[in-house]
Image (tube, rainbow, N blue to C red):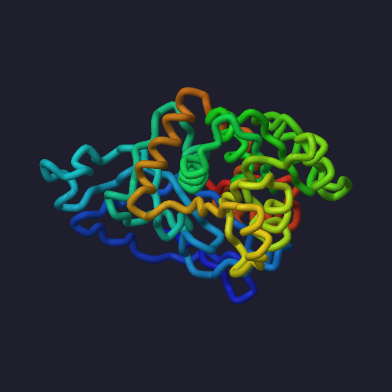
């Protein structure tokens, strides 16, 4: 099979290797689509992705594909995954990414992909659990919600906030094209952080009170501070993207304003359930993933895809690679 790896300079290389073994409780998946992350150090100072072929902190994240074979115990009666079989379309959760033609995945970390959801959209759905969990913990119904950064996480957050009953959704980003996508996916108020005073705009929009909930979707210390600054007393800051290793919190200020910090990240055992829940929302049209999918490349054009992601954050939201 073919595998894409990164060289020392971060450029993709194609190599050949054996198809991985399928262990007793695994399924062997022929990869159809994966979504990519940036290679380079981000503008917010976060670490660059690893050059390993892994899911977290690397350029390949969730992926979709078709089950080629199942391990000996996968079809055993009474097991949670006894319904999986050869030919099933699936989303892989908490895996080592989709930079190979085949991946062996624990059967309890795959979710069936509905026929009416494309492989590319399914790969994006694999990114929904943190957003869904964060919204569940924040209880946003009736709240005014501020979304800081409307890349993939922010655009998902905008939609989930809207369907969760948020009274209003205010979106902020540095790029006008991303803000337009936020408007198309449910944001009521748009703030261009590159040309406008975000704090002033939020306070004007909320009558000087501040928002009930801030969604940190940019992953930097500056965006974290912005999210806290626009909260009303007693407001909730929900971290949906955590690219920075550390942020500074003025404990006295947070205490005096009674601010609450909520981490969106789910536990690994919850991921398949949340992916399935996300796919159901996609299936009924409550969440739209197609507007997030800005580019699709065949796997042999991975270098071009990565150049686009690294160099044009205004144009690229989700970029998918297609195998076969």
**Relative side of 23 to 46, left or right:** left
Q: Tell me if residue 24 can be seen.
A: yes
Which residue appears at 60% of the width and 62% of the height?
A: 243
**Relative side of 158 to 203, left or right:** left
Residue 83, located in which quarter of the rendered image?
A: top left
Please state the horizontal and vertical placement of residue 259, each as a whole percent of the image. 61, 52
Instruction: State whether residue 289 is above or below residue 43.
Output: above
Instruction: State whether residue 116 is above or below residue 273.
Output: above
User: Residue pushed farthest bottom?
Assistant: 8
Which residue appears at 28% of the width and 49% of the height?
A: 108
In this figure, what is the number of numbered marks?
Answer: 0
Q: Tell me if residue 324 can be seen.
A: no
**Which residue occupies the foreground of this view, 14 or 66?**
66
Residue 161, located in which quarter of the rendered image?
A: top right
Please state the horizontal and vertical placement of residue 279, each as a whole percent of the image. 43, 34
User: Residue pushed farthest right?
Assistant: 195
Please state the horizontal and vertical placement of residue 216, each as a whole percent of the image. 63, 51
């Amino acid at each position: 099979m073919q595998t894409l790896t990164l060289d020392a300079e971060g450029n993709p290389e194609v190599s050949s290797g054996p198809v991985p073994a399928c262990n007793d409780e695994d399924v062997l998946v022929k990869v159809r689509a994966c979504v990519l992350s940036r290679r380079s150090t981000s503008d917010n100072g976060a670490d660059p992705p690893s050059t390993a072929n892994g899911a977290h902190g690397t350029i390949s994240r969730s992926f979709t594909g078709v089950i080629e074979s199942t391990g000996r115990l996968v079809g055993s009666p009474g097991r949670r995954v006894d319904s999986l079989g050869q030919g099933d379309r699936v989303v892989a959760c908490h895996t080592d990414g989709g930079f190979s033609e085949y991946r062996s995945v624990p059967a309890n970390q795959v979710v069936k992909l509905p026929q009416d959801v494309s492989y590319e959209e399914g790969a994006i759905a694999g990114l929904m659990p943190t957003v869904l969990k964060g919204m569940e913990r924040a209880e946003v119904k009736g709240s005014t919600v501020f979304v800081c950064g409307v890349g993939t996480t922010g655009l998902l957050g905008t939609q989930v906030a809207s369907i969760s009953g948020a009274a209003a959704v205010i979106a902020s980003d540095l790029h006008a094209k991303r803000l337009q996508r936020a408007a198309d996916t449910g944001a009521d108020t748009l703030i261009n952080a590159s040309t406008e005073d975000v704090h002033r705009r939020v306070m004007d929009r909320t009558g000087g009170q501040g928002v009930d909930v801030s969604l940190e979707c940019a992953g930097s210390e500056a965006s974290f501070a912005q999210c806290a600054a626009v909260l009303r007393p007693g407001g909730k800051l929900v971290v949906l993207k955590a690219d920075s290793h550390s942020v500074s919190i003025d404990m006295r200020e947070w205490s005096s304003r009674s601010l609450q910090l909520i981490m969106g990240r789910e536990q690994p055992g919850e991921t398949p359930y949340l992916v399935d829940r996300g796919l159901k929302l996609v299936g009924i049209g409550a969440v739209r993933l197609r507007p997030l999918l800005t580019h699709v490349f065949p796997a042999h054009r991975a270098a071009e895809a990565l150049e686009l992601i690294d160099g044009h954050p205004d144009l690229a939201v989700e970029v998918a690679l297609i195998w076969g």
